[in-house]
Image (spheres, coloured by chain):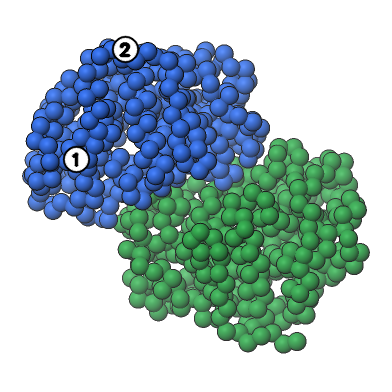
Chain colours: A blue, B green
Amino acid sequence: MEPRAAADEVVEVATSPPYLVRVGPGALAHVSAACGSASGVALLVDQRVESLHGALLDAQPRLRAAPRLSLEGGEAAKTFGVLERALDFLTDAGLDRQGCVVTFGGGSLGDLGGLAASLYKRGVAVVHAPTTLLAQVDASVGGKTAINLRGGKNLAGTFHQPRAVCADTTLLATLDPDELRSGLGEVVKTAMLAGEATLARLEVLAPALGRRDAAALTELVAACVRHKARVVAQDPLERGLRRSLNLGHTFGHAIESVAGYGRVPHGVAVAVGLSLALRAAESLGLCSDPDYPGRIRALLQALGLCSSLQELRRELGQPLSGGDLLAAMAHDKKGAVGAPELVVPAAPGSVEPGVRATAEQLSSWLA
Amino acid sequence: MEPRAAADEVVEVATSPPYLVRVGPGALAHVSAACGSASGVALLVDQRVESLHGALLDAQPRLRAAPRLSLEGGEAAKTFGVLERALDFLTDAGLDRQGCVVTFGGGSLGDLGGLAASLYKRGVAVVHAPTTLLAQVDASVGGKTAINLRGGKNLAGTFHQPRAVCADTTLLATLDPDELRSGLGEVVKTAMLAGEATLARLEVLAPALGRRDAAALTELVAACVRHKARVVAQDPLERGLRRSLNLGHTFGHAIESVAGYGRVPHGVAVAVGLSLALRAAESLGLCSDPDYPGRIRALLQALGLCSSLQELRRELGQPLSGGDLLAAMAHDKKGAVGAPELVVPAAPGSVEPGVRATAEQLSSWLA
């Protein structure tokens, strides 16, 4: 099957109030309109993205005229120092409570900008224009904002739903190959949660995604956003169902932390986390579809992702010891201290959330 | 009329979920119970208050055993640096998402601690044990949290309702005289909003408050909390009615900012702000009770507060020029830039919110 024609797709996230996620090759042109009747607009932009695609913003008069703060993207953006800079920038820009912040960059910039918007004058609107695959399929939708603390990733943040998201898939053409892989890790996770139809479609389109086919990217990003929108609308504050989205993340965060933040792209770590979660499922007898683990490992390989912890260790040339990973997992913010909670995949579209494994079990999977 | 007997009073704040504010001489003993079924407790305490009253916390085993971070109180607490320290402390304390932060200190510490609690792991519970009159009558109730930015006071914050508030009026016996005055400024504001009954009671009890009579303090603090609880329950996110609570604050914040943060206690600035708001009401023909301005000025004097900007200038020995105050008002976060929105008092229990004055009018009131 060919990917569907690459017109924009529009997905509603039925939070209160609801908002629209526009996905496709024309999405960026809608950013100014998405700011609605804001009294003023201020832009937080990734400096690399700006040098490549700034002209697309300038084509919209309100955005061309808006005060703009260029920031380094990636984990470097998610610190107290940058948060303070962003908030001082919004003050200097004279933004009032009816103003709107626009973020133009990857997931880290969106996390930082969303947090700044949620704190500035106790909350102003934010429109995300995500520029990486990771941010388009996952980070920009759902309202989670965060910065990192000394003690761990995303430890300080808020829930602050955006006013709109404009995910322009043409921007993915210039994405760094590592960042593309990173996004594909989250695409696999989301397809596993969304169920057989999306997963099968991803298997078919994997080669097209690898060569950044615009129609394939638009179709898959929209499918991922549609799944995430359903989950977020049912559980905006992550009290239950939404925890399923952490599939692969408890392991993934530990890998990122032990390797040193920024060394392993988030979605690459999540992909290995998925393989570890599948191993947990098999080991605990929770996997109800015997073909499932092999199928996902093949998919990860087809997308150029590591399908095991061993493979990542070789690729990085780092030991990532089981003991270090176990210690990092004990600090993951999702569970009670010392007993990380796992989301375990049972079959396409089906997970077992809230599984607690013993230290012995975890050690054997992380060996 | 004598003040009523000083037993604890309990006021419900009907937010979602609702919470209780306990006011009186036995309130502090309820802090541990107020933490409920929290998986862990961590304390943020004002170092001066701790040296005076720490034993009262130690009497509760769960609080005695809890990790404790001592911080400098006042505006010094409301910076990015201290916020980061507080969040690192909560991480080191191993608090998980079911944990509870307890603040023991004045309004600034509560603002900082409430913000830290709202950000830590995207939100954990907080119990406030306010130790100043200002915090007991105002800051601890309603869920506003904040730190200051270079560009202004309280410019970064959240709405995060506490799980409970325990306002122990016996702690007010050791309050610094300036801090007592500061709290009395907010008491006058609240009485003006609450209406004739509370205002008349405040006029009767003014001398008793000045000598820190426990029963009088408990009665007035409870009356103020009762009014604030009604307003907050109707408008938790300050979209309408709650703006009335900013009576005197647009002027007051400008005074604090121009004098230099920490030079004029908040409630002392608010008291002058009330006198300026009354002047605005008279000048704009919005005052419907001709006795009202004189009555409030007499009350401010009876409580040892400045009843005019001129009086404050003399007391401080600072010019606090009209031009500087006007410029500071243009940055107040309550209104659109350049056009500060005033809450103007019309009569006891009645205000005109959202009044916009011209720069000429403002200049003449600030002369």
Residue A303, quarter of picture: top left
Is B309 left, or right, of A124 in this rendering? right
Q: Secondary structure at mark 2?
A: loop
Residue B185 showing in the rendered view: no
The image quarter containing residue B216 is bottom right
Residue behind mark 2? A213
* Image quarter in which the N terminus of chain B is found: bottom right
N-term mark: 1 or 2: 2
Comparing A342 with A23, the one in front is: A23
Q: Which residue is drawn at the image coordinates 30% and 49% (left, top)?
A: A334
Say which of B222 and B15 sits in front: B15
- Cβ–Cβ below 8 Å for labels 1 and 2? no
What amino acid is found at the position of numbered circle 1 in the picture?
Pro
Chain under numbered label 2: A
Q: Residue B99: percent from the left, percent from the top? A: 36, 60
Q: Residue at x 57, y 39 (%)?
A: A124
- Residue A18, disc: none
The residue indicated by pointer 1 is A345
> Residue at point 39% right, 14% down?
A6
Q: Taking the image as drawn, is residue A95 in sight? A: yes
Left/right placement of residue A248 relative to residue B224 reads left
Specify few, some or many for label 1: CA neighbours under 10 Å numbering under 14, 14-19, or 20 or more. many
Residue B93 percent across, percent down from the top left: 33, 58
**Distance from label 1 to label 2 (Cα)?**
29 Å
- Could you tell me which residue is drawn at 79 percent across and 54 percent down? B352
Q: Position of residue B166 (x, y in %)?
A: 51, 71
